[in-house]
Image: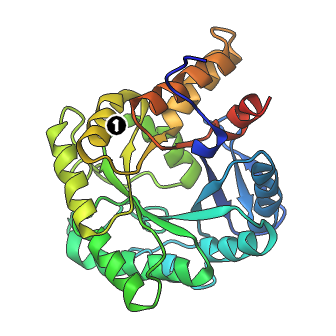
């Protein structure tokens, strides 16, 4: 009766990986219980997700073909675009969010265009804007730029508004840190950089005030929801962002955070379900309104009891 923090199924967003082909359900080795789905199998899984009361999914696409510019990200019949159409057709009431970043689509694995080993911020903005627009045209309910290029929220907002998609919200990865907790995701999405790393455009983990500046810029450019990523090692950032801006805040309980718990639970070292719920409550207590988590299905089953 006097519990201060409430965690609900309504707070959860389930990340899903979609691949080309048919009849595919491939477990990701470093993420037990998480799979890559072809579109036909994705819709079946998403129906179960919706049946648990989880209000939204976020899609990450893995194409069959990659190149230097990530051109497949703009294909109107690309893997994410087809997945969006299928989900909106077959899973009614489920909010479909799409990740907007070209790292899964580029042969070099970086989130921006590359020339002579350097990331090209401004030329990447056009690609991201066209990618977001193609997702909206396919029927996406929300787009989520995760690239950390400067100015991408404003560029995407302009592209959406200019094509009649004024009502499509943007959930911006506003404070995305250069974290090693992303390792299992990069296996899942086949997006490990082929050279260097992402520290030139993702945030330095010791920095907190910088996160507030990044969030303020994204809000000014038109972000509707702002995200902190990762979540567990950055609870203080979630708290500071929520208190500073009183804006809708999302937090990404990322792959490494998930896999650590799964590995320990599978070895019998801890109670996986109780630790899962403790972590999710901590993220909510810090101030997150939305929690993107691979635990969403398991947490929903517990919350629905």
**Looking at the picture, does residue 138 appear above or below residue 272?**
below
Q: Residue at x 29, y 76 (%)?
A: 125
Q: Residues within 10 Å of mark 1 (few under 14, many from 20)?
A: many
User: Which residue sits at x=62%, y=76%?
Assistant: 81
Q: Looking at the picture, how far across and down is residue 78, in whole percent? A: 61, 78
Q: Is residue 251 above or below residue 145?
A: above
Name the residue located 76 percent from the left edge and 60 percent from the top edge: 42
Q: Quadrant of residue 138?
A: bottom right
Tell me where residue 106 sits by quadrant.
Answer: bottom left
Q: Name the residue rendered at 55%, 17% in the picture.
A: 2
Q: Position of residue 178 (x, y in %)?
A: 30, 43
Answer left or right for 216 relative to 60.
left
Mark 1: secondary structure: helix
Q: Quadrant of the N terminus?
A: top right
Residue 232 pos. (x, y %): 42, 29
Question: To which residue does mark 1 refer?
Answer: 238
- Residue 202, x across and y down, in percent: 27, 50
């Amino acid at each position: 009766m006097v519990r201060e923090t409430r965690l609900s199924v309504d707070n959860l967003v389930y990340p899903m990986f979609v691949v080309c082909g048919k009849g595919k359900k491939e477990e990701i080795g470093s993420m037990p219980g998480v799979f890559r789905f072809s579109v036909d199998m994705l819709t079946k899984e998403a129906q179960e997700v919706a049946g648990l009361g989880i209000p939204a999914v976020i899609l990450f696409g893995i194409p069959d073909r990659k190149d230097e510019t990530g051109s497949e990200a703009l294909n109107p019949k690309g893997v994410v675009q087809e997945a969006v159409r299928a989900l909106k057709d077959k899973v009614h009431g489920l909010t479909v969010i799409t990740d907007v970043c070209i790292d899964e689509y580029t042969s070099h694995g970086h989130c921006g265009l590359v020339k002579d080993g350097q990331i090209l911020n401004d030329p990447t903005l056009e690609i991201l804007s066209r990618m977001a627009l193609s997702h909206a045209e396919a029927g996406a309910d929300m787009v989520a730029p995760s690239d950390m290029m400067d100015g991408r929220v404003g560029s995407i907002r302009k592209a959406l508004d200019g094509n009649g998609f004024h009502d499509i919200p943007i959930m911006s990865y506003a404070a995305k840190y250069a974290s090693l907790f992303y390792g299992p995701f990069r296996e899942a999405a086949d997006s490990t950089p082929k050279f260097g790393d992402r520290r030139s455009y993702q945030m330095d983990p010791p920095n907190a005030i910088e996160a507030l500046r990044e969030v303020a810029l994204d809000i000014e450019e038109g972000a509707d929801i702002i995200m902190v990523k990762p979540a567990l090692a950055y609870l203080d950032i979630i708290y500071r962002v929520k208190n500073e801006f009183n804006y809708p805040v999302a937090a990404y309980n990322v792959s490494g955070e998930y896999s650590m718990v799964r590995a320990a639970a599978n070895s019998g070292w801890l109670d996986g379900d109780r630790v899962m719920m403790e972590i999710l409550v901590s993220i909510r207590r810090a101030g997150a309104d939305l929690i993107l988590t691979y635990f969403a299905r398991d947490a929903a089953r517990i919350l629905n009891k």
